[in-house]
Image: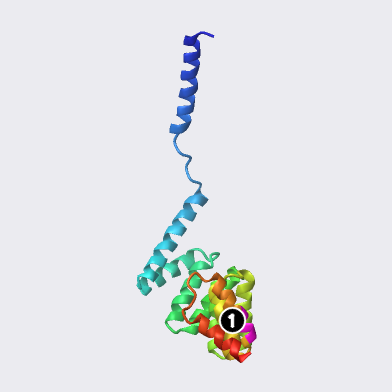
């Protein structure tokens, strides 16, 4: 093959390949575009919640829950807002609605456990915590809440020690008093 012919073939190949690089991007599907809008809206609601603008967060989450009743996240966050305001009745309704959509939602299960524990319904609280841990065995808040329940409310320090140690192994920043709780529970066994 002559060098001119080889050079020509190389130019054609380069032109074809460069066309691939500069081709316009494929348009997003309607589903991808809707998902992106949903994620952006959810993110804005979370940011409002984090900066303490509860009214804005509630409004955004309510709109998301209305527009996307198949999504548990907005409902859980509305439950958390109500829980933090001391409105356990409304919080319970939102958490139960979230569980109707996603029965394994660990935050909803854990919060319902806290509500039950605070109401003195210890068996029900234990069921919620265990259901959360069945969904995610490394969910630190449910591990610690179940440990407290067993230790303080149900008089089972042996069960609590195992959970305190488990919490210690999964928590990114274990509670500073954790070693004291483990020591105390072991002394009561």
Q: Which residues are magenta?
A: 158-162
Where on the picture, by quarter, is residue 159?
A: bottom right
Position of 121 relative to 145 (above/below): below
> Residue 159, can we see it?
yes
Q: Residue at x 44, y 56 (%)?
A: 37
SS for dot 1 = helix
> Observer-nearest residue: 70 or 124?
124
Q: Which residue is mark 1?
A: 146
> Residue 108, can we see it?
no
**Residue 44's spot in the image, x, y percent?**
39, 63
Colouring scheme, one of rainbow, by chain, secondary structure, one colour: rainbow
Q: Main secondary structure of the magenta part?
A: helix
> Observer-nearest residue: 91 or 7?
7
Position of 83 relative to 69 (above/below): below
Which quadrant of the rendered structure holds the C terminus?
bottom right
Q: For residue 159: magenta?
A: yes
Q: Residue at x 64, y 81 (%)?
A: 127
Q: For residue 114: magenta?
A: no
Going by the picture, which residue comes out furthest to the top? 2
Q: Residue at x 52, y 51 (%)?
A: 31
Q: Residue at x 38, y 70 (%)?
A: 50
Q: Is residue 52 left or right of residue 132?
A: left
């Amino acid at each position: 093959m002559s060098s001119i012919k080889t050079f020509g073939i190389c130019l054609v190949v380069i032109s074809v390949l460069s066309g691939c690089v500069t081709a316009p991007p494929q348009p997003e599907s309607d589903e991808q575009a809707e998902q992106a809008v949903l994620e952006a809206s959810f993110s804005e609601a979370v940011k409002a919640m984090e900066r303490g603008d509860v009214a804005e967060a509630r409004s955004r989450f309510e709109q998301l829950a209305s527009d996307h009743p198949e999504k548990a996240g907005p409902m859980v966050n509305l439950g958390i807002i109500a829980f933090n305001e001391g409105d356990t009745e409304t919080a319970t309704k939102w958490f139960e609605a979230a569980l109707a959509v996603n029965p394994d939602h660990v935050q909803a299960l854990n919060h319902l456990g806290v509500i039950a524990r605070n109401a003195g319904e210890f068996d029900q609280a234990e069921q919620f915590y265990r259901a959360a841990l069945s969904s995610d065995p490394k969910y630190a808040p449910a591990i610690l809440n179940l440990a407290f329940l067993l230790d303080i409310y149900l008089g089972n320090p042996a069960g609590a020690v195992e959970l305190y140690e488990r919490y210690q192994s999964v928590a990114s920043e274990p509670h500073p008093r954790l070693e004291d709780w483990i020591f105390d529970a072991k002394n009561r066994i």
